[in-house]
Amino acid sequence: GKHPQDGNPVELKVATRGYSIWHGSKIAPVPKVLL
């Protein structure tokens, strides 16, 4: 979906150790504990 503040696309991608959230050039890992 889109980021609520700047409108840039935010993607949830499958990474080697769980998932990652991509927002522009920023990548934030999502621990499997949160899923």
Image (cartoon, rainbow, N blue to C red):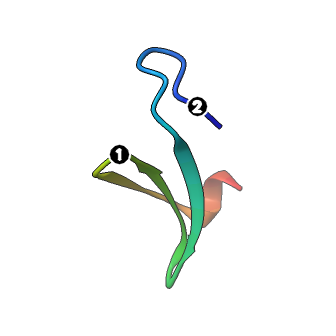
Tell me if mark 1 has few (under 14), some (14-19) or many (20+) residues whose alpha carbon lies within 10 angstroms of its own: few
Q: Which residue appears at 41% of the width and 19% of the height?
A: 6
Give the residue furthest to the top.
5
Residue 24, image x and y in percent? 35, 45
Please name the amino acid that badge 1 sits on.
Answer: Gly
Taking the image as shown, residue 24 lies to the left or right of residue 17, namely left
User: Is residue 20 shown above or below 1?
Assistant: below
Residue 25, image x and y in percent? 28, 51
Please name the amino acid that badge 2 sits on.
Answer: Lys
Give the residue furthest to the right.
35
Q: Which residue appears at 30% of the width and 49% of the height?
A: 26
In this view, the residue in front, 12 or 8, is 8
Name the residue beneath numbered marker 1.
24
Query: Which numbered circle lies on residue 16?
Result: none
Taking the image as shown, residue 8 lies to the left or right of residue 32, namely left
User: Is residue 1 shown above or below 32?
Assistant: above
Query: Which numbered circle lies on residue 2?
Result: 2
